[in-house]
Amino acid sequence: MHCNRAQIRATCGEELSGMRVFVAGGTGVIGRRLVRQLVARGHQVTATTTSKERLGLITNPNVECVVMNGLDAAMVHDVVAAAQPDSIVNQMTGLSEAHAGKLNPRRTEQFFAVTNRLRSEGIDHLLAAAHAIGVSHVVSQSAGIFNGIREGGWIKTEDEPLEVVEGTKALTHLEDAVVTAGGAALRYGALYGAEADAEQVKLVRRRLVPLVGGGRGYSSLIHVDGAASATVLAVEQRARGVFNICDDEPAPFSEWLPYLARNARGPSRPGGCRCGWPVC
């Protein structure tokens, strides 16, 4: 995947500051970092979470944190209307064990089921709420990890479509809906950094991560702080369109996966695993 975060600046207008920003999914791994960065830049933030127990994850007294079910259209409308934001950011996922259960590499459709609903039904509810109260700009996370179309060269730009598989149908819907509404969809690469790769580390320790293509493949990575910073930029410059958000240099599987395994104290040699794939 090719990334050019400078393109956000090149395609947008004057930077805006001091806005009221609504962050749906503000207590997630990216959401918490995004909220901190927005507040540091002088914006007023309303962040949502899925339960009262998670309200304490945001301790900044300048941030209003509220409970919202992204799949409840009426609740989404009421919470957004109460916040009266200038811009809305969608960071909603259901990737925690509480929402998705334990990740089984052989049954990933179950793990991503709630997230796919949030990327289809959930984004529709957010866009409808934005339209109802006159919010003209929405920024949403998307994903650009393993979903590039398998044609042409291995470097993919924003102009190239996602591969049409079950897991990308919701992403395609999300991107089309957000861009049609005049907003920006950010295709984050594979996330790394504190908390972002915790589930992957667990799988590596259990020897359940495949060394795809014998290690000849590449990953487009992005640190969680970098993903948050790019999102702030998209909000402030009212970006429109689809943007790849990842590090400048793709990382070979043959290098980063063995390195992760060694540092996670997992196996460091090829071998079989319960899913039948060679693992690092």
Image (tube, rainbow, N blue to C red):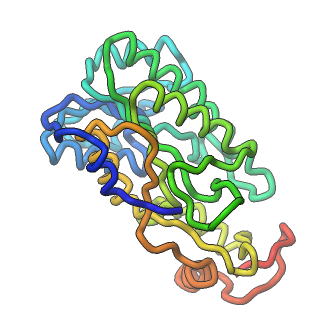
- Residue 54 visible from this viewpoint: no
Counting from the top left corner in percent of width and height, residue 272 is at 84, 79
- For this view, does 96 lie left or right of residue 210? left
Q: In the rendered image of this protein, does residue 157 appear above or below residue 98? A: below
Residue for point 22% across, 43% down: 38
Residue for point 35% across, 27% down: 66
Front in this rendered view, residue 206 or 105: 105
Front in this rendered view, residue 256 or 182: 182
- For this view, does 81 lie left or right of residue 242? left
| Quadrant position of the C terminus in the picture | bottom right
User: How many numbered circles does the render carry?
Assistant: 0
Q: In the rendered image of this protein, does residue 263 appear above or below residue 116? A: below
Q: In the rendered image of this protein, does residue 13 appear above or below residue 193? A: above
Counting from the top left corner in percent of width and height, residue 264 is at 56, 79
Q: In the rendered image of this protein, does residue 47 appear above or below residue 189? A: above
Counting from the top left corner in percent of width and height, residue 230 is at 33, 52
- For this view, does 263 lie left or right of residue 33? right
- Furthest toward the bottom, the residue is 269
Counting from the top left corner in percent of width and height, residue 22 is at 31, 30
Residue for point 53% across, 22% down: 124
The quarter holding residue 261 reads bottom right
Residue for point 14% across, 37% down: 17
- For this view, does 236 lie left or right of residue 117? left
